[in-house]
Amino acid sequence: MTLQKFTVPQKYFLHFYVVGVAVTTSLLLAICFYAYMKMTPLLPEPSSYSTIASHLIGSNSFSFGSVLSRTMEHKYRVWRTVFVLLLMEIQVLRRLYETENVFHYSPSARMHIVGYLTGLFYYTAAPLSLASSCLPEAIDFIRGQIVEFIVKGRARMPDLVIDSPSLLKPLLKLGWCQWIGAIVFIWGSLHQIRCHAILGSLRENKDSDEYVIPCGDWFSRVSCPHYLAELVIYLGMLIASGGSDISVWFLFIFVITNLSFAAVQTHRWYLQKFEDYPRSRYAIIPFVL
């Protein structure tokens, strides 16, 4: 009875994804606005090269080339962040939908309050980690825009015109890392969708507490294929980020550690619950764990 005081219904998983959608959407809009206003075009227009070159007569062209290279890298880093946040937005929106429409939580299913608070913290910290490389400068830019709006007033501010090609073109010109990362992300997402559908179908009677051994897709190899798919999804985000941001690495390591621990606990529960549970299955990673 005392333990129940420190638990919440398992259906509160929904709160994680509501928070995740709110935080990710806010960051995506802020950094996308900054990228569009300050980091477009991603590549200098051909005509601009001749203009720039005309100013290099008698100057240090090597120094200019170095500055141009750093500027280009900065632009790529900002647009990479937009790309990765788009992947995160897809992930949290899908999980929000699945939690509400695919999973049927048992009325007696509970989770510890520590796990609940950890989940809320994670879905706040994860998007912040993905955005950390350019979030401070985006906030400074938006703050400056707000101050300018207050000082000048709406009538004296230029109209904001969103040109769709200019918004999409930088994302389409990103490097091979982003597209490989996106493919890995989609691959993991498709398997997670399938595994969640299998888990959701096991409890068609929402008021029942009966448990059934899940089968199909990656369940033939591991006890927690939805966790394995989550690792693949975050691996895709790591690849798409370029792998140069330490905060994204910390996020990926946390996901591996947390889900591996949860998978081992679930695997042990399956073995204790079902005498006929397949002994050939691993917990989360085939032939490893």
Image (cartoon, rainbow, N blue to C red):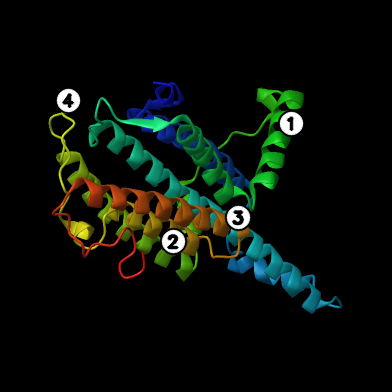
Which residue occupies the foreground of this view, 177 or 230?
Answer: 230
Disc 1 target residue = 148
Give the Cα distance between marks 3 and 2: 14 Å
Give the Cα distance between marks 4 and 2: 36 Å
Q: Which mark is residue 247?
A: 3
Disc 2 target residue = 235
Residue most toward the right?
58
Label 3: which secondary element? helix
Residue 216: percent from left, percent from top: 15, 56
Circles 2 and 1 in contact, beta carbons < 8 Å: no
Give the mark nearer the N terminus: 1 vs 3.
Answer: 1
Which residue occupies the foreground of this view, 153 or 244?
Answer: 244
User: In this picture, is 194 found above or below 55?
Assistant: above
Answer yes or no: is residue 161 visible.
Answer: no
Quadrant (top left, top right, bottom left, bottom right) of the C terminus: bottom left
Residue 105: percent from left, percent from top: 26, 31
Answer yes or no: is residue 80 visible.
Answer: yes
Give the mark nearer the N terminus: 3 vs 2.
Answer: 2
Label 1 Cα neighbours within 10 Å, binned few <14 / some 14-19 / many ≥20: some
Disc 4 target residue = 207
Residue 98 position by quadrant: top left
Quadrant (top left, top right, bottom left, bottom right) of the N terminus: top left
